[in-house]
Amino acid sequence: RKPETKMGVSTYVSMVMGFLAVGALATPTPSKDGSFFTLNNGMRFDSASFGLQVYDDDTAKAYTLLAIQAGFRNFFSSVLAGNQNGFGEAVAASPIPRSELFICGSVNTGSGACSGFDDCKTQTAAGCAQNLQAIAVPQLDMIMLDYPASDCPSIQGQWAAFEDMLSANQTKSLAVSNFNLDQLKCITSNASATVPAVNQLPFSVGSGDPGVEDDAKAGGILVQAYSPLGGGGLPSDPDCVAIGKAHDKSGAQVALRWIVQRNATFTTEASTLQYFQEDVSIFDFVLSPAEMSTLNNKLARSLL
């Protein structure tokens, strides 16, 4: 497999998502087989998402159609990848009705791109409109901030633009990526604010915060792992491979199943029908407590 990474700024290795109580928000709950979760707003969110990487529009269209053929229905089309037009063309060409596809777009006004409430709101609003135009749909299922702005007023400006998009029925839900505890509080300290449904973070066997998914559940926010195969190394990891043999599964499938059994979801990438099919074929087996312990210990050792 080719290594998968989140585009842009360097990955955060350890993110903490536990934060203040958020009232009556529902805790994200998995289906019996773990194939989907119910978000804090009641929406269904498939555990396996195809996250487009940096390539041209034609490639984006081809890979998206392969993913749909393999059974993917959840898609993350980040503006950072530069191929939302190609993704939108695939959605339009797909034999699967739009109503059966979950489309998440993104806006990148964080990491110093905007400053202050007004500037961040204006730039983020423009980014929201850009997503709808590029993907060529009147409404997204989710819009995500790729990165937080540099301070609370700026983050609140970003979020105000997202709230406007939600109120205008141009998106059904709001999400963040790479947000830590303090950055989340910039949003949730406002009791009337929409709490993010998802926080997309680096999380995989042997990498990330060992309590990240439990902390997220406490706040009603579901973690979506990016780089879920550890930058491409986990498919050949000896422990993942050995455990996979016991279930007639690959090392990659074991690594992805571990994420789901940690009450998180993942966005992954592939370039062949075989690998796309492999990534969605992880809901017909369960890792035993001993197998989970072996993989959990790899995460604990990475933090020593």
Image (cartoon, grey):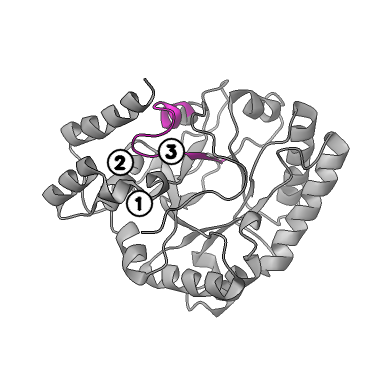
Instruction: Give, as a three-letter code, the residue at label 1.
Output: Ser
In the image, farthest residue toward the left: 246
Q: Residue at x 34, y 30 (%)?
A: 299
Instruction: Give, as a three-letter code, the residue at label 3.
Output: Phe
247 above or below 10? below
Residues at discs 3 and 2 in contact (Cβ within 8 Å):
no
From the viewer's side, name the closer residue of 7 and 23.
7
- The quadrant holding residue 161 is top right
Q: Which residue is tagged 1?
A: 35
Q: Which residue is tagged 2?
A: 258
Q: CA distance from mark 1 to mark 2?
A: 13 Å
- Residue 23 visible: yes
Q: Residue 231 appears at what percent x and percent y?
A: 42, 47
* Foreground tag (3 vs 2): 3
In the image, farthest residue toward the right: 118
- What span is colored magenta in the figure? 197-215
Relative side of 68 to 274, left or right:
right
Q: Residue at x 38, y 37 (%)?
A: 263
Mark 3 and mark 2 lie on one chain; the one further toward the N terminus is 3
Q: Which residue is tagged 3?
A: 203
Quarter holding the C terminus is top left
Q: Badge 3: few (under 14), some or many (20 or more) residues near its Cα, within 10 Å?
A: many
In terms of secondary structure, where does tag 1 sit? loop
Q: Residue 79 appears at what percent x and percent y?
A: 66, 57
In terms of secondary structure, where does tag 3 sit? loop
